[in-house]
Amino acid sequence: MDHRDLLSALFWVGISLFVCFASIRTDIGTFHSPGPGLFPFLSAVILGAFAILLLVTNSLKKKSQRKIADLWRGIEWQKVIWVLFSLFLYPILLTVMGYLITTFGLMFFSLGIMGRSKVWVHGISGLMITLASYLIFYTLLGVQLPRGIFGF
């Protein structure tokens, strides 16, 4: 097992245990009446499960000689810069253009940058993601979303 994977997995198991114990002290609540510590507790459990999964999968692998430089090989930096630029631009345009238009634009652009499929697939996928998030946040949870200059 690679010692870097071992150290990172142990670190995340430690973080997840710390958050679990802190959440329990904060009051998790019950299933019908969740407390403020429930979401951090569940998140920490999932994080711990992934860290343990990392430990198990890497202990079953044969040891390979990887170098840190190998981790960065093949990364398309121009895509990373474009996605970061779009993520910085998103909150600026959100109040001006509104949630639906800005989120669709971000999804369409991100899928176009990262994917290799056709443009209409990006459009339909972006529309489905935008409408699903709108349904969850606005309709089901009652979160007020920015309407923008067009009123929607």
Image (cartoon, rainbow, N blue to C red):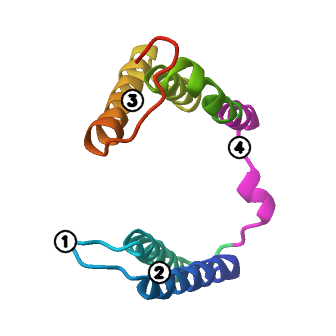
Q: Is residue 65 left or right of residue 5?
A: right
**Disc 3 marks which amino acid?**
Thr
Pair 2/4: label in front: 2
Could you tell me the amino acid type at mark 2? Ile
Q: Amino acid at mark 1?
A: His
> Which quadrant: the C terminus?
top left
What secondary structure is marked by label 1? loop
82 or 76, nearer to the observer: 82
Tag 2 residue: 52
**Circle 3 or circle 4, nearest the eye:** 3
Give the class, few, some or many, for how many residues have Cα within 10 Å of label 4's Cα (few <14, many ≥20): few
Of the image marks 2 and 3, the number of the one nearer the N terminus: 2
Query: Crowding near pointer 1: few (<14 within 10 Å), some, many (20+)?
Result: few
Residue that mark 1 sits on: 32
Q: Give percent across and percent down for residue 114.
A: 56, 32
**Residue range (magenta):** 65-84
> Which residue is drawn at the image coordinates 67% and 29% (left, top)?
89
Give, as a three-letter code, the residue at label 4.
Ile
Task: Please determine whether, in this image, residue 13 is positioned above or below residue 95.
Answer: below
Q: Residues within 10 Å of mark 3 (few under 14, many from 20)?
A: many
- Which badge, 2 or 4, is on the more N-terminal residue? 2
Label of residue 75 in the image:
4
Give the Cα distance between marks 3 and 4.
28 Å
> Which is more N-terminal, label 2 or label 1?
1
Residue 150 or 58: which is nearer the viewer?
150
Look at the numbered disc 3 and give the secondary structure of its residue: helix
Q: Which residue is mark 3?
A: 130
Closer to the eye: label 1 or 2: 1
**How many marks on residues?**
4
Q: Which mark is residue 139?
A: none
